[in-house]
Image (tube, grey):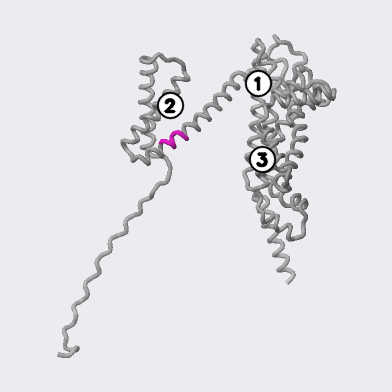
Amino acid sequence: MTTLDLPPAAAAAPAATAEPPRPEKRIRLGGVTAEDVLTVAGALTGSLALNWMLYERILPFSGAFGFLLCWYVLFLLGYFAIGRLQWGPLMVRDRLVSVVAWSSGVLVVGLIADQIGFVLARGLDAAKHLNFFTESMDHTAALSPITSGGALNAMVGSLEQLALTTLFAVPLGIAAAVFMSEVGGRMARPVRTLVEAMTALPSIVAGLFILGVVIITFGFEKSGLAASLACTVMTMPIVTRAAEVVIRLVPGTLREASYALGGSQWRTVWNVVLPTARPGLVTAVVLGMARGVGETSPVLLTSGFTSQFNADPFSEHQVSLPLYIWNYVKQPYPEMISRAFAAGLTLMGVVLILFVTARVVGGRRPGQLTRRQVRRTDRSARLAEAAALGAH
């Protein structure tokens, strides 16, 4: 029988029906699940009940701080025990560390909110009146109503002293940072050691230094200028340390490109390094200003106190917000204490503005362009391309 005589092959069996693909299961990395919330809630509730029974009924302890501390310790133990019933040892340790980190952050935020709320509650009576921001204490006595007097003289004094401190500290601080990071040599290490030591210098020592050298030795009077010199001693190390770190972050390839084009070292520093590190340098300056505006001990020894309005920082006593607060908060009159807390609220607002400014301005890396600069660069590139096409 030949091949042609073979019976026709049977029809091929239909292909097996393919199973529909199963949907992929998403794996969540991080986040908070219902298990986590219920575990934390159960540990909090159980530890609170146990702590109340032990602390208030059985053990001879008292006090809110001890109660909260014991509650927190029992909460961690309870969370570990409840978590061990659900998860493995590795996951329990990981989530316990997460709970400690989260609770620490909540504690810090709670303390800050408590301080702000306390100052706001005590100083709102004075701060809600416009005269507090438009008048000084020239014609205000201890028993005068809250609608009389204010802290205008202290606010003007703080701003002027802060401006002088910035004028003195910023050039010296940035120059020292450039010397340590760009020049170096044998003197770089002693300068860095001195700057680090000045960073930990107590503020009262800075005030005593200016008092002994500038006021007693050279015969200058107590004034806003002397207070700004004392604040400069406290501010300059902060500016120097922060500026040095920022300058070191500038890529070395930019320096090499400048040297390859024939630029000198100082031309490279002035035209390449400092403009590239500008956002970080602004952050360093603002952080130093925030440190200087809140100093009390140096100002107490060098500026003197007066209730008069003095807009001249180079002559006679000049009060600032920290000194205003220190002088009036210790008096036994409710109106004076309320004015002191209102001044504290104003000082907190100034510091908050400075720190937010540092965060916004310094959020970019060295050399990173802003959106406006990117748009300007793109527009210049498009114009150059259009000009090249028109020339052809």
Where does label 3 land, which residue?
242
Q: Does residue 233 sit above or below 91 in this rendering?
A: above
Tell me which numbered mark, 2 or 3, is placed earlier along the sequence: 2
Res 342 label: 1
Helix, strand or loop: magenta stretch: helix
Whether residue 252 appears in magenta in the rendering, the answer is no
Tell me which numbered mark, 1 or 3, is placed earlier along the sequence: 3
Q: CA distance from mark 1 to mark 2?
A: 34 Å
Which segment did they paint magenta? 96-101
Tell me which numbered mark, 1 or 2, is placed earlier along the sequence: 2
Q: Does residue 142 sit above or below 269 in this rendering?
A: above
Front residue of this view, candidates 207 and 86: 207
Q: CA distance from mark 2 to mark 3?
A: 37 Å
Res 85 label: none
Residue occupying the point 77% across, 26% down:
210
Mark 3 falls on what kind of element? Answer: helix
Between tags 1 and 2, which lies in front? 2
Front residue of this view, candidates 272 and 185: 185
Residue occupying the point 45% across, 33% down:
100
Where does label 2 land, which residue?
72
Marks 1 & 3, CB-CB < 8 Å contact: no
Q: Dividing the picture into quarters, in which one does residue 209 lie? A: top right
Asked whether, in this view, residue 231 is left or right of residue 40, the answer is right
- Could you classify mark 1 by the number of other residues whose Cα lies within 10 Å: few (under 14), some (14-19), or many (20 or more)? many
Question: What amino acid does circle 2 point to?
Answer: Tyr
Question: What amino acid does circle 3 point to?
Answer: Ala
